Image (cartoon, rainbow, N blue to C red):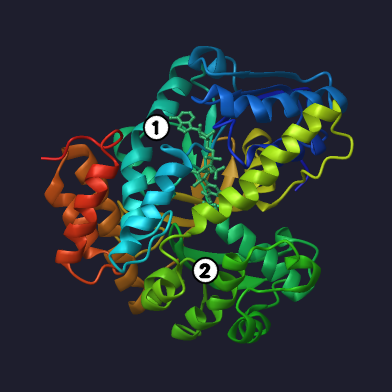
Amino acid sequence: MVAQKDDRKFSVLIAGGGSTYTPGIVLTLLNGLDKFPLRKLKFYDNDGERQKKIADATAILVKERAPEVEFEATTDPKEAFTDVDFVMAQIRVGKYAMRSLDEKIPLKHGVVGQETTGPGGIAYGLRSIPGVIQLVDYMEKYSPNAWMLNYSNPAAIVAEATRRERPNSKIINICDMPIDIMDRMAAILGFKDRNDLVFRYYGLNHFGWWTDVRDKQGNDLMPKLKKYVAKNGYWVGGDYDANTEKSWEETFKKAADVYKLDPSTLPNTYLKYYLYPSWVVKHSNPNYTRTDEVEAHRQKLVFGECKRIVEAGTAKDTEFKPDEHSTYIVDLCTAIAYNTHQRMLAIIPNEGAISNIDPTATVEVPCLFGSNGPERLSMGKAATFQQGMITEQNSVEKLAVDAWQEHSYTKLWEAFSLCKIVPDAGIAKDILDDMVVANKDYWPELK
Ligand code: NAD
Ligand code: G6P
Ligand code: MN
């Protein structure tokens, strides 16, 4: 949809300025000034040293490409959150050091160790909740009319917590996984981009299914996609996947096996952890997990490129480029700013969107995005398989938030035990007890 022209220019704050995803967003914003004009770009992080490395390179980028845009990086919340129209949040409370433990502790007990899934995801949830709520409070105090688009994970648990703790706040929780998959669908089908596809999708975050994918003329594209996914998963290969890391290649390919469980839908890649946990554990190295890979690859590339830009004093030939993560969040801001009612996914209170799921569940469904935020679209009834899985996983997420609110060891043990990937309550307790120690600087003291 074409954005209406008017003379507004926006002020954007990236909270978690030190994130590895920040340069991609900066590039997307600078490339798209004709569609989403900026007057100010700010970074906020509670680790000034980490943020500075990205900010110093960004200052050069902004000066070269859009000198009229004011840029500043700060660790001071008042300075950061004052005079802001949009907050793009992507903080990682506990940083990679804690992510590493989220992955390694469960694996030590023979259970999937993953950033947002199972015990690792729950542990991360209890660290993230207060961090994200603090960002919401800063926004409401210093820029009460602003919107926050939040990527900070685990988005499902964070969204459930903000639904309860800050029900009227203008935070919209989002995820780039379905976006990445829809880019792949477009590539598989030979379409220019994901915005050529009209889709129906429902579930929880990192836990959902497409029930329909069509082109703009209404032609059903599911049969062709299903045929492809049954064989290759979402792996495109060739130039498209030239820079895709090994572990993601495995995940995109495994979608073929996940798909087979319900050939009437197309699955989110994250379902592999819930449906094939033994396979995942067998394919994991407890001493070298995804965090080690990210530190050796993405983090190194991003910070290396920032250093190179700063040393060269120019970003003219930078390798940084837009990706699905950055284009999605900028598209969302554009849709809100210009009231376009573009159909996009968000993680929001169910309230009937999936008719046979608890109305208070926090679900991921398509919404129309306009100046009042997201308006959810009705996705109808979940089939028995999905209804069962969603209900169980949603209870896990609710118990995790209960545990945080009530400081309850028992609720957290229940969350771990109910989780599909944990075989029994004894193992759940062993993992939990290790995690209580590892998270002592972040979690409330559990009773
Ligand atoms: P990263 O560690 O590189 O960056 C996170 C930054 O947040 C760090 O600079 C850190 O200092 C800062 N930070 C931590 N706690 C903070 C706090 N309380 N206040 C302010 N700043 C704080 O991490 P990354 O790999 O770039 O990922 C960033 C976040 O985005 C993570 O939560 C990740 O899970 C999430 N993410 C989500 C999606 C999604 O689909 N929702 C996609 C990609 C990344
Ligand atoms: C996808 C998910 C994010 C998750 C990320 C992890 O983009 O949607 O929620 O944070 O993958 O990627 P990483 O490369 O850090 O393992
Ligand atoms: Mn996600």
Residue 403 position within the rendered picture, expressed as x and y whole percent measured from the top left: 20, 45
Q: Nearer the viewer, residue 75 or 310?
A: 310
Q: Is residue 160 visible?
A: no
* 10 Å crowding of disc 2: few (<14), some (14-19), many (20+): many
Residue 205 position within the rendered picture, expressed as x and y whole percent measured from the top left: 44, 57
Q: Nearer the viewer, residue 136 or 20?
A: 20
Q: Which residue is mark 1?
A: 131
Residue 34 position within the rendered picture, expressed as x and y whole percent measured from the top left: 83, 34
Q: Residue furthest front?
A: 287
> For disc 1, does the CB lie below 8 Å from ligand 1?
yes
Give the amino acid type for the residue marked by disc 2 in the picture.
Thr
> Helix, strand or loop at disc 1?
helix
Q: How many marks?
A: 2
Q: Which residue is mark 2?
A: 269
Q: Quarter-wise, where is residue 213 in the image?
A: bottom right
On-image quarter of the C terminus? top left
**Up/down of 265 relative to 415, above or below:** below
